[in-house]
Amino acid sequence: MQDKHPLAYELEMAEYAEANGFSEIWQADTRLARDCIVMMSAFLTRTKKLRVGSGVLPIWTRNPAVIAASWSTMWELGKQVSGDPDAPSRVMLGLGAWWEPIAGRVGVKRERPLQAMREYVEAIRQLFTMEEVTYQGEFVKLDRVKLDVVFGDTRPRDIPIYIGATGDKMLELTGEICDGVVLNYVVSVDYIKKAVALVAKGAAKAGKTIDQIDRPELLVCSLSDDDPKAAYFEAKKLVAYYLATEPHIMKASGVPEDLIAKVQSVMSWPATEAEYIAAARVIPDDVPRMLMAVGTSDECVAKVREYIAAGVTCPILYPLMDDIKPVVDAFAKF
């Protein structure tokens, strides 16, 4: 979930997805629109078994001790709602390095993101042990800090940590230090193959194999059996956003640079709906077809299978159309 759909509808669809066999739901920390912690907590209270993850929380926005406390609270919430205190964690922590222009506009300097990410992951993992932690890094400084749970469950938090990684070095780091990687969306199948290989390279540094690293991928699903052309047009508007704001992702997937330049010439940030529409009109059908699951149910299911064959362990479907139910229905028996 991002911020396209009404809040009440998202909660309803979380219940619907769980009833139809889905295993997990991820909430984006969307721009400055919706906070992932609020939405994750809401999902936990409305479902019994679904695992819930952040896809992804920017590390620069919160102290690692505060992050650990928030996830510790959701860990307890998930167990209490499910009624099984001994069940595995229902929450997953996905961290990211944020992106421009939003970081710079709010005064965040994303200096040495690889080092910062390593320190955050190491410190948070130590805090999840529920022991006292002292950590002196370049970005993280903890002086005898612990999750000070007195009246609740004091057991260690078995919360898996993921990094939302796009660049080569971050993908390697993720394989080395994390339980999983949240692979980016609006990328090609070939990009995913290369990304998985880089995660495997990082895992090998730590004596792990790629099979020990969970590899969910955010995967746009613009689906309409009634109006496939409309599904393509919605997909193009999202592609336009990425062409304008994160062209490095588009270049990594092989999108022609002249198309990137053409879209950027008609887009500002934040872009208006009119700009999205104007940009979408210059994007050919083969671009969204290369970058996401788009079109009819059969087309979308076939495309998702391509990503799984490339190394994705769990497709995190982002329903782009107003109606989410057809996406759940199409993949209920997947």
Image: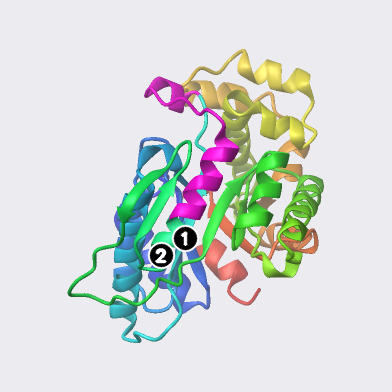
Q: Nearer the viewer, residue 180 or 44?
A: 180
Up the image or down, 167 lies above or below 334; here it is: above
What type is the residue that disc 2 sits on? Phe
- Whether residue 91 is visible to the viewer of this picture, yes or no, is yes
> Residue at (57%, 57%) from the top-left corner?
317
Residue 120 painted magenta: yes
Identified at 69% across, 23% down, the residue is 282
Left of 118 or right of it: where is 167?
right
Picture coordinates of residue 223 (x, y %)? 60, 54
Q: Give the CA distance from mark 1 to mark 2.
A: 5 Å
x, y percent for residue 100: 51, 26
SS majority, magenta: helix
- SS under mark 1: helix
Residue occupying the point 68% across, 29% down: 248
- Badge 2: few (under 14), some or many (20 or more) residues near its Cα, within 10 Å? many
Label 1 close to label 2 by CB (< 8 Å) = yes
Q: Which residue is mark 2?
A: 128
Q: Which residues are magenta?
A: 101-123
Instruction: Identify the secondary structure beneath mark 2.
Output: loop
Q: Position of residue 4 (x, y in %)?
A: 42, 45
Q: Nearer the viewer, residue 88 or 44?
A: 88
Marker disc for residue 125: 1
- Outermost residue toward the left in this view: 151
Vertical arrangement, residue 159 with respect to residue 191, above or below: below
Q: Which residue type carries mark 1? A: Arg
Disc 1: CA contacts within 10 A as few (<14), some (14-19) or many (>=20): some
Residue drawn at the location 69% of the way across and 69% of the way down: 212
